[in-house]
Image: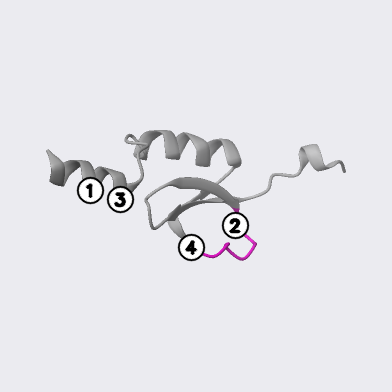
Amino acid sequence: MSNDTVEVTHAVVVNDEEQYSVWWADRDLPAGWRKAGFEGTRADCLAHIEQVWSDLRPRSLRERMATSA
């Protein structure tokens, strides 16, 4: 069986700046990241991120812009 036919489960992860990414569900997370509660194929995870991550600015920038407005 080739690696192309094996579906790997991925997880949507998020950092403290509320930036999203995809990570392998069975691997330890890198420092500063936590699971966001969605798992599936890589394509499913990317589709989920597209739905939930509408403002790509880091959280700290959004907060700074809100206080200066």
Q: Residue at x 45, y 46 (%)?
A: 20
Front position among marks 2 and 3 = 3
Q: Which residue is mark 2?
A: 25
Instruction: Identify the secondary structure beneath mark 2.
Output: loop
Residues at marks 1 and 3 touching, judged by CB atoms closer than 8 Å: yes
Q: Which residue is mark 1?
A: 63
Q: Position of residue 47 (x, y in %)?
A: 47, 34
Residue numbers of the magenta segment: 24-32
Instruction: Specify few, some or many for label 1: CA neighbours under 10 Å numbering under 14, 14-19, or 20 or more.
Output: few
| Label 1 – label 3 distance at C-alpha | 5 Å
Q: Which residue is mark 4?
A: 32
Q: Residue at x 57, y 35 (%)?
A: 43
Label located before the other in sequence (4 or 1): 4
Quadrant of the rendered structure where residue 55 is? top left
Q: Nearer the viewer, residue 37 or 22?
A: 22
Label located before the other in sequence (2 or 3): 2
| Label 2 – label 4 distance at C-alpha | 16 Å
Q: Nearer the viewer, residue 63 or 30?
A: 63
Q: Position of residue 35 (x, y in %)?
A: 47, 59
The residue type indicated by label 4 comes to: Gly
The residue type indicated by label 3 comes to: Ser
